[in-house]
Amino acid sequence: MQQKHTLLRPDTAMWRKALAGIPRVKDKSQWDALDPLSRWLISTRAAVLLMTLFAGIIAGMYAQMAGHFDWLRFVVLLVGLLMAHAANNILNDLTDHRRGIDKNNAFRTQYGTQPVEQGFMSVGQSRRMAFLTALIGALAGIWLVLASGTTVLWFFLVGIVLLFAYNWPLKHIGLGEPLVVVVWGPMMIGGGFLAITGFWSWDVAIASLPYALGPTAVLFGKHIDKIPWDKPRKVRTFPVIIGHLAARRTTMLLFALQYLVVFYLIATGFFSVALLLVLVALPYYLGTIRRVFTKPTPEECPSDYPKDAWPLWYSSYAFVHNRKFGGMFMLGLIVHMVLAYFGVTIF
């Protein structure tokens, strides 16, 4: 009885690690000692789920700006989006394991934990975890369709298709990266706005792009890091297709477009100048471009770089920039809404 209590005891320290990064679990005994939530957070790569959380919050902010915010729909939307992304991450690891991509000192296991490949979970356990996670997301989606109207149904159905199609075949034919712009932008933020308010807005779809370009840059960075691993295994991600240098330049362009689209939306009056707060992230962007993306991957882990993050390189810097830009973007939206609430107009 005492051992059972120990196994089920919440490991809040591991929760924090899983939300901040991708913890490495050294062996099955350590895995078995983790509480169920810790295992779920590690299996779903919870740290990257924050990108989806931010997208859902931005959708809610746009709904508030339009005067049609609904708390219940907003909360259900967040649950649905997070569970869909979490299920996709579980299925991604499961698919790569079954296709043999993660065998023999897999890239994934060098910087984090791949529970199925490392024998911590069976294929059946992974499937059940993915099913239960996706089921919660599906129930949230069905509720939103019933509450918000049939237009949301199309986003729900397309989301289900993409949930499975990303892992195979889209990621393997260079379509995974372009898909992210659509999913984190018009689908998550634009569709989230639709689910909360009950109506579609093309302005919101355009205004979703500054944030959506961030997760796209993160994925580009990850797939640049994986070129030496993916190319021999015929995983034709977009960076594999266009090559290392072109992929780095594309990622730099994605960063720049985030700022340029914000400037455009300020100039057209959709945003106030409060959104210039994103410029707080600009020094990090410029430094990252100069020190990281203009140069090839280091041959070995630099002395001033976290050893636990290696061999991730470009994706780590893209992820940090996304958090900085995304945080300032949301802070700008909050300032914009507060000023609007008090009737203050700034141009």
Image: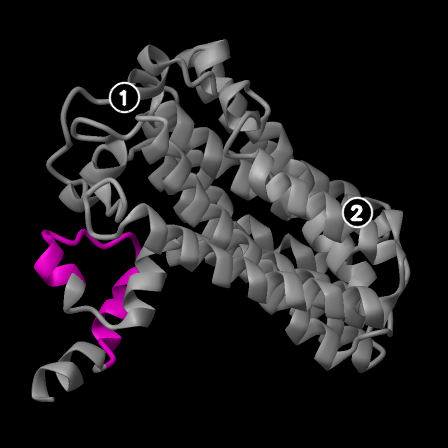
Label 2 or label 1, whichever lies nearer to me, is 2
- Which residue is denoted by mark 2 in the rendering? 205
Q: Is residue 185 left or right of residue 22?
A: right
- Element on which disc 2 rests: helix
Colour scheme in use: one colour
Image disc number at residue 297: 1
Going by the numbered disc 2, the residue's amino acid type is Ala
Q: Is residue 98 above or below residue 194?
A: above
When asked about the image quadrant of residue 164, the answer is top right
State which tag comes first along the sequence, 2 or 1. Answer: 2
Q: Which residues are magenta?
A: 10-31
Image quadrant for the C terminus? bottom right
- Residue 39 in percent (x, y) is at 29, 63
Q: Is residue 57 visible?
A: no
* Residues at marks 2 and 1 touching, judged by CB atoms closer than 8 Å: no
Which residue is located at x 19 percent, y 46 percent?
119
Looking at the picture, how far across and down is residue 115, in whole percent?
Answer: 26, 49
